[in-house]
Amino acid sequence: MEHALDITLTVNGTPVSRRVEARQHLVDFLREELGLTGSHVGCEHGVCGACTVRVDGEIVRGCLMLAVQANGCKVDTIEGLSDSKEVGELQRAFHERNSLQCGFCTPGMLMAARDLQLKNPAASREQIRAHLSGNYCRCTGYQAIVDAIEEVLHGKS
């Protein structure tokens, strides 16, 4: 590693220390170094949302953030949110509403949905759509995804 740096961060509650290339993206670090493959690499331009992770409580695009920028940070991935049951209710609603098909966008959608649930639990359908506008889905047409999130936020069935 020609331009490597040492980093220490907390990933899904576990302290992690590694030597990484200065230019390695956070999503690549999570996938390649830690085996956390739930965050997907899609457009690599921060547009599709497939690589969404949470850093110090804020969702970010893992393809736009370098691993070294996460030094000292708390990083949560879809695996951590799923294992802790933090997104359990959303996962159930996505399943019941058939809000997933190929599943490629689902981890990023769930991360964004949880972010909305924490920040605006009374969000309207329009606000749900606006919050998800940075996450692409080529399969579902979004209707079922919005329905699932609305069900969790407002208790609709």
Image: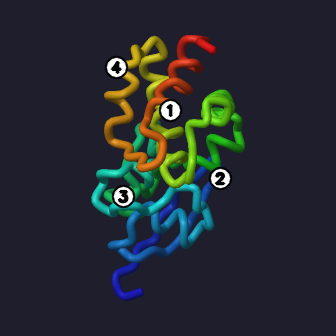
Q: Earlier in the sequence, mark 3 or mark 4?
A: 3
Structural crowding at the residue carrying mark 4, measured as other residues with C-alpha within 10 Å and reported as few (<14), some (14–19) or many (≥20): few
- Mark 3 or mark 4, which is nearer to you? 4
Quadrant of res 127: top left
Q: Position of residue 139 (x, y in %)?
A: 47, 48
Quarter of the figure with the C terminus: top right
In the displayed orientation, state which residue is furthest to the bottom: 2
The residue to which callout 4 is attached is 126
Residue type, numbered disc 4: Glu
Residue type, numbered disc 1: Ile
Q: Which disc is residue 69 wearing?
A: 3
Quote the CA–CA distance across marks 2 and 4.
37 Å
Secondary element at image label 3: helix
Q: Position of residue 3 (x, y in %)?
A: 34, 82
Q: Earlier in the sequence, mark 3 or mark 2?
A: 2
The residue to which callout 1 is attached is 145
Q: Are marks 3 and 4 in contact (CB under 8 Å)?
A: no
Left-right relation of 54 to 38? left
Left-right relation of 88 to 44? right
Secondary element at image label 1: helix
